[in-house]
Every structure is written in structure tokens, then in C-alpha cells.
């Protein structure tokens, strides 16, 4: 039983790294925001966007009903996206094992803090990387350390208070260079 728990934990930790490894080149791209209405207070460092909010920065795409971004004097930002469903999609950095893979997520609320590089997806949260999937009531991950935590909600939530992970088997490389599934 202990070995099964250790294996499950190792698999979860293996999933965490790819989920948070978003395309770094997006940071240097311009940000485009469209919404039904917007509010910007440059002195206080607060922007708010309402109604069918769409944010695009490079490969990053966010949809929400409402987005509030605050920025301190040092340029640190906190973004809170809320709505019936808040979604994001971003291309992951290519790695030798994964090319052209997308990270997608959804929740009723997404908080992102640039100070500690933490994203928190709350209420029926899902994060998908390629064909791997993580489902929980709250999913928290740090985009720098690539460590995440997930917890289930109450028994009345969609996932009945549990956390679910679906991992696809890794392809094994044969000595002749061809790929075989285990």
C-alpha cells in the first residue's frame, strides 16, 4: 500500500512540472485586452475589465467575465479573473519530450500573483497539459518552482470532494529509435 501511495505521489509531482512550464517568450509580448467596459487608474495601479473579457499575450489567451489587475510601485501585479467559467490557454515551452503542447485550464476564479509566481484556480478547477488532466476544487501551482497542490471540495462538488489525475503512459524508446508504448 505504501508503494502505491509513493507511486501516485511521484506521478503527481511529475505532472506538476509540465503544467507550470508555460512559454517564457510570452512575457516579452504586448498585452491586448478587449471587454465590454474597462476602468484604469494609473495612479493607484488598478485596472478592471467587465463583460466578455479577452486577454491575449503571445500564446496566452484568457477569457473571463471580470478581470481586476493591481500593480504596486515596484511593478508587481496581482490578477484576479472571475466568472461563470474563467479559461486560459498557453503554449508550453518545448522540451525534448514535448513539442507543440498546450496548457489549458478553467475554474470559476483564477488568481495570479507575480510576486510569488503563484496561480490559484478555485471552484471546479481543471488543468490540462496535452492529454494529461488534473481536476480538483482548488489547484495551486508556482510557475517558478513548478510545485503544485490540489485539493477536493465538499461532497456536493462536481468531483465529490476528491482530486483526480489522468496521466497518459510515457512512450518508451526502443534501441533502434522507434517508439513503443509500455
Image: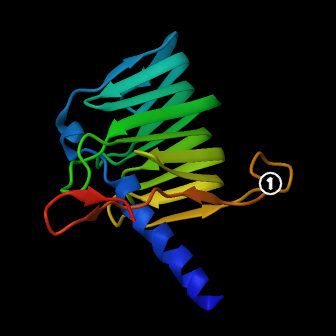
Q: Which residue is mark 1?
A: 160
Is residue 132 something that shows in the picture?
yes
Which quarter of the rendering shows the C terminus? bottom left
Q: Is residue 101 left or right of residue 89?
A: left
Snapshot quadrant of residue 138: bottom right
* Residue 41 locus on image (x, y percent): 42, 26
Residue 141, compared with residue 87, is above or below; it is below
173 or 152: which is nearer to us? 173
100 or 151: which is nearer to us? 100
Residue 53, compared with residue 118, is above or below; it is above
Residue 59, compared with residue 17, is above or below; it is above
The chosen color scheme is: rainbow
Which quarter of the rendering shows the N terminus? bottom right
* Residue 39 locus on image (x, y percent): 47, 19
Q: Secondary structure at mark 1?
A: loop
What residue is drawn where x is 77% and y is 58%? 161
Is residue 83 something that shows in the picture?
no
What residue is drawn where x is 20% and y is 31%? 29
* Residue 97 locus on image (x, y percent): 24, 56
What residue is drawn where x is 36% and y is 28%? 42
Circle 1 residues within 10 Å: few <14, some 14–19, many ≥20: few
* Residue 43 locus on image (x, y percent): 37, 31
**Most distant residue in the top direction:** 36
What residue is drawn where x is 41% and y is 34%? 89
Residue 88, compared with residue 113, is above or below; it is above
Amino acid at each position: 500500500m505504501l508503494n502505491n501511495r509513493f507511486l501516485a505521489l511521484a506521478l503527481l509531482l511529475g505532472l506538476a512540472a509540465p503544467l507550470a512550464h508555460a512559454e517564457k517568450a510570452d512575457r516579452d509580448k504586448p498585452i491586448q485586452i478587449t471587454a465590454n467596459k474597462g476602468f484604469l487608474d494609473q495612479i493607484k495601479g488598478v485596472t478592471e475589465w467587465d463583460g466578455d473579457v479577452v486577454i491575449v499575450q503571445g500564446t496566452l489567451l484568457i477569457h473571463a467575465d471580470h478581470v481586476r489587475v493591481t500593480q504596486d510601485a515596484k511593478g508587481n501585479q496581482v490578477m484576479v479573473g472571475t466568472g461563470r467559467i474563467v479559461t486560459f490557454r498557453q503554449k508550453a515551452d518545448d522540451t525534448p519530450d514535448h513539442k507543440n503542447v498546450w496548457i489549458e485550464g478553467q475554474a470559476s476564479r483564477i488568481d495570479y500573483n507575480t510576486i510569488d509566481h503563484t496561480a490559484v484556480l478555485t471552484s471546479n478547477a481543471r488543468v490540462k497539459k496535452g492529454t494529461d488532466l488534473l481536476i480538483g476544487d482548488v489547484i495551486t501551482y508556482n510557475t517558478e518552482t513548478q510545485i503544485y497542490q490540489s485539493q477536493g471540495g465538499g461532497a456536493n462538488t462536481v468531483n465529490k470532494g476528491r482530486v483526480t489525475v489522468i496521466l497518459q503512459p510515457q512512450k518508451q524508446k526502443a534501441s533502434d529509435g522507434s517508439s513503443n508504448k509500455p
